[in-house]
Image (cartoon, helix red, strand yellow):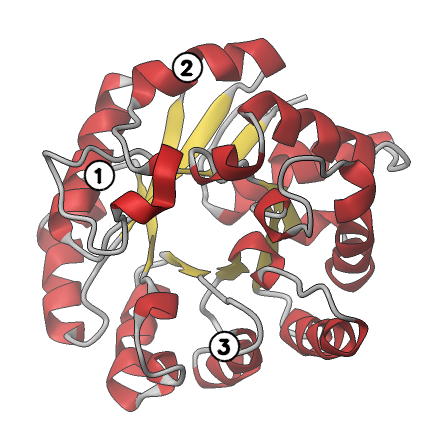
């Protein structure tokens, strides 16, 4: 069975500017590169990964693509393009990134933008249409509730765009908020081109130090009910994940949360879905 981590990051503070990454983030305010992750992948039997952008810049994308070229276990890169400049996006794809087999899609740190409706403005929609026309994907940093509610709007305006909701939109703790989260996730799931990542859930739990699979299972079960395993994919969210445990803990507790799935469902969530979504062409 293919095991694919569809959401991990690398960053180097001297090579790329990460405006959001400040000393207050403690243990993740440091350099994290491929040699740091590789032994942890081997420990849990992870075959391949997808690196996801950590800065809205070409510099970060170029850094990730160089890392991918140097490490055969990196299967793809989710980079960045200027959604507010669709013409520049098209040029960059056609003249540069579109020729790189690792470049599979983009993300923008919309949760760092002051305007919660930023992603729905006409120019950004034009940029997303450029992505769809070139067969590239869009990772949605859908931090509940400000961004998750916009996914159906994006689906309606760019129906052919393949989207994936990162971290199940960071499910909330409260019962009332949980009901709204479920309603918004259900609305997002209505478009078959919308997928979701079972990732980043450890840092959404109430007890970052002592969380277990039982804390994340209700969220995972809801996602399975709404999307099905064929539209869900595993991601570690390393190194952000170390704010609430090790890479191995994230892997092992996720596996426990999925223990009651059948073989085909497990194969989909652990690798097949991400492989198909990003068009990685990996051997299953």
The residue that mark 2 highlights is 38
Residue 73, quarter of picture? top left
Q: Is residue 277 left or right of residue 79?
A: right
Q: Is residue 54 left or right of residue 244?
A: left
- Give the numbered dot on residue 80: none
Of circles 2 and 1, the one toward us is: 2
Q: Is residue 216 left or right of residue 167?
A: right
Residue 151 percent coordinates (x, y): 53, 76
Asked if the residue under mark 3 is in contact with the one under mark 2, i.e. CB atoms within 8 Å, the reply is no
Q: Is residue 131 left or right of residue 98?
A: right
Tell me the element at label 2: helix
* Residue at left offset 50%, top offset 79%: 146
* Residue at left offset 66%, top offset 33%: 270
Q: Is residue 75 visible?
A: yes
Tell me the element at label 1: loop
Position of residue 145 relative to residue 239, above or below, is below
* Distance between the alpha carbons at the discs numbered 1 and 3: 25 Å
Residue 131 percent coordinates (x, y): 32, 65
Question: Which comes sooner in the sequence, label 2 or label 1?
Answer: 2
* Distance between the alpha carbons at the discs numbered 2 and 3: 37 Å
Of circles 2 and 3, the one toward us is: 2
Q: Is residue 258 visible?
A: no
Asked if the residue under mark 1 is in contact with the one under mark 2, i.e. CB atoms within 8 Å, the reply is no
Image quadrant in which the N terminus is located: top right
The residue that mark 1 highlights is 100
Position of residue 84 relative to residue 91, above or below, is below
* Residue at left offset 74%, top offset 57%: 223
Q: Nearer the viewer, residue 148 or 96?
A: 148
Residue 280 percent coordinates (x, y): 44, 36
Residue 101, quarter of picture? top left
The residue that mark 3 highlights is 159
Question: Which comes sooner in the sequence, label 1 or label 3?
Answer: 1
């Amino acid at each position: 069975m293919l095991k694919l981590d569809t959401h991990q990051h690398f960053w180097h503070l001297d090579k790329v500017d990460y405006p959001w990454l400040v000393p207050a983030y403690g243990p993740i305010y440091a350099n994290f590169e491929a040699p740091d992750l590789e032994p942890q992948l081997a420990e849990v039997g992870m075959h391949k990964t997808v690196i996801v952008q950590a800065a809205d810049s070409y510099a970060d994308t170029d850094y990730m693509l160089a890392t991918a070229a140097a490490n055969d276990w990196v299967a793809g890169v989710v980079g960045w393009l200027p959604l507010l400049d669709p013409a520049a996006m098209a040029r960059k794809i056609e003249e540069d990134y579109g020729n790189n087999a690792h470049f599979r899609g983009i993300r923008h740190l919309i949760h760092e933008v002051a305007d919660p409706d930023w992603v729905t403005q006409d120019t950004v929609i034009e940029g997303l249409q450029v992505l769809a026309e070139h067969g590239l994907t869009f990772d949605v940093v859908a931090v509940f509730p400000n961004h998750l509610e916009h996914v159906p709007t994006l689906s309606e305006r760019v129906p052919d765009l393949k989207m994936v909701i990162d971290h199940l939109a960071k499910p909330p703790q409260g019962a009332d908020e949980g009901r709204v989260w479920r309603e918004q996730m259900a609305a997002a799931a209505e478009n078959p081109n919308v997928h979701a990542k079972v990732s980043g859930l450890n840092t959404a739990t109430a007890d970052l130090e002592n969380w277990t699979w039982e804390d994340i299972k209700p969220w995972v079960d809801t996602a399975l009910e709404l999307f099905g395993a064929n539209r869900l994919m595993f991601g570690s969210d390393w190194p952000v994940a170390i704010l609430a445990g090790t890479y191995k803990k994230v892997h092992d507790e996720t596996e426990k949360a999925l223990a009651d799935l059948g073989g085909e469902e497990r194969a989909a969530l652990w690798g097949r879905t991400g492989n198909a979504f990003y068009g990685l062409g990996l051997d299953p």
